[in-house]
Amino acid sequence: MRLVTLNLLMCNSEECSGRNQALTLNPGEITPGTTQFNHDLTIRMLGKLDWLAFVNAALRLGHELPDNITEADHQNSELIQRIFDILFNVEIQTGELLCPNCNRTYPIEKGIPNMLPQDH
Amino acid sequence: MKSYLCSIYAKQKFIDFCVSELISLSSIHGICPETLFSTYNLPKTYTEYDYCEHFLPQITEKPFIYVNLPNVSAAEHIAKRGVCIERFTFPLAEADSISSLVENTLQRFNNDPEAAQFILAESPFAFRFDTYQSSVSQEEKESIVKSFGVIPFKGTVDLRSPERKFIVSISKSKCYFGLEIARSKDTRTRFYAKYSLSDREYLGPTTTDMELALLMANQGKVLENSLVLDPFVGTGGILIAASHFGATCFGGDIDVRVLKGLGVGRSTKNTEADIFTNFVNYGFQKPEIICCDTSRSCWKSGEIFDAIICDPPYGVRASSKKIKKDAVGTILPRDSYHGARVFEDLLNLAARLLRVGGRLVYLLPTIRNSYSKDAVPTHPLLKLVGNSENILSKKISRRLITMEKLEAPVSVENEEGKEQFYAGIREKWFLKNDN
């Protein structure tokens, strides 16, 4: 799982339903990705991301990003490249996703988060 | 706008989807079906469904459709990614017999300077034959070429690498003559030959046929940097097709075993393969995979995806025998999840996650004698743009359904009856297959 996906997922417990509740990552093994830089894809993603949640997730993994991003930043190729690498080239192989609202956890194994209820 | 002749060529089992594919790929270039088929003066009220009904009955006998496209590069782009589209030609003549075909070509040459310039060009050229449902011997071909001698072609003949290819197309009821402007294959194989299932390292019993997966990606108008979701991803066959067109892919499945290579998905080469293996082998960006339940979505609401493409657990991907075998537990890990609900959940998911104008593409199994148009699931935020039938036997078929996300909801007819139609369709499917 990459950070791009973390940003698109929400807690699906009964308690959090309808809240679009973002999840926090507790990473285990992380491997570097090899996805080739794609400027246009990064710009497209900027329009879809919850930026603050992304900044916080990145910070927990030691990557600092500006608090907000403007149209002018789209021309900043160094920044766009950095955003791309954090979005697409940090691969979380193991770990867990934690819901800060209901405290439910979702395990990540072999790079795949398991969002099914525990009793499944 | 230019008029071209499009030749259709597809395996029998996919021929039903050719008109839909042509419409979808043209719409990528901003061409609506009304413009695309304006040569035929069809009613303005025609929907994609009506166009399919209009063209399909004769397509196996006469697989040619006149289309209007903005330019050669649009035709090239469509031919390059079409599964059912063989080539586009600049049409020079049409006739019922070869002798009148030559006559008509000559007339066109004398009266139309644009057509004449293709014949008078100095570059090397050759004749090629395209025959449908009729065989033409080598001697006959030679005599046909000779009969075209009355037209003053310029340039030298080069059979190996001609710059101009004149195509003589012969079908049971019509012949055509034209200059090729775009073709789906340059060599003997089509662009997707390298994705053959038998060469794939990771495979499941219901991995989507590659041609079907590409057809579905074409219906979804998947382009470079599209974001595509398959919520019933299985071994990832549909996302391989989307990746070929440059999409960034996301997949979900309720069965964690098929994702990790522990269940029905398996390695064909005794390796530790999983859902990511094929993507790595083809040099694609790895898809993002989530183990989740579509009825309890874990995706945040928002206009995230450009296309949602899938074969829901009912979908019929392999031969009918295989389906029967797979029906025991493997396709459908949760017994309670059937009837209309799987489609209801899918449409709700699409309405919640597609961008406006984004497309939902899926396969809908149908019992032919109890099918009615009204049984196709509806949603106030999704407009039905494609519904083509792929007949599998006298009794059963599957439909390729394409819907587009609307900006604002429209009212839909009441949903009563649909539940009933789909409750038990699974049982009926397998029962009818046995007959």
Image (cartoon, rainbow, N blue to C red):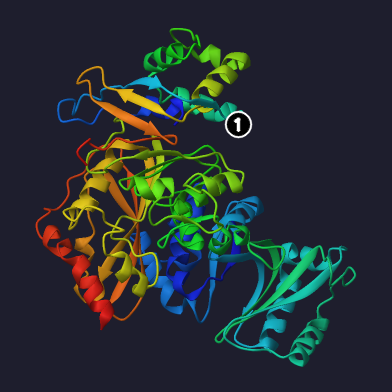
State left or right for residue B391 relative to residue B143. left
Identify the residue at image location x=68%, y=87%.
B98
Nearer to the camera, B20 or B305: B305
Nearer to the camera, B142 or B66: B142
Residue B147 sits above or below residue B185 on the image? below
Which SS class for mark 1?
A: loop
Figure disc tally: 1
Identify the residue at image location x=61%, y=62%.
B193
Res. B197 in view: yes
Q: Which of the chains bears the disc numbered 1?
A: A
Identify the residue at image location x=44%, y=56%.
B216
Image quadrant assignment for residue B264: bottom left
State left or right for residue B95 relative to residue A58. right
Which residue is identified by label 1? Answer: A34
Residue B343 sits above or below residue B303 on the image? below
- Quick one: which residue is furthest to the right in this view? B156
Nearer to the camera, A91 or A8: A91
Within 10 Å of disc 1 (Cα), the crowding (few <14, some 14-19, many 20+) is few
Q: Quadrant of the C terminus of chain B?
A: bottom left
Q: Position of residue B369 (x, y in %)?
A: 22, 76
Q: Position of residue B253 (x, y in %)?
A: 34, 46
State left or right for residue B364 relative to residue B190. left
Please state which amino acid type lies under the numbered disc 1. Answer: Thr
Q: Position of residue A116 (x, y in %)?
A: 26, 38
- Quick one: which residue is furthest to the left in this view? B416
Nearer to the camera, B389 or B344: B344
Res. B245 in view: no
Q: Position of residue B326 (x, y in %)?
A: 32, 65
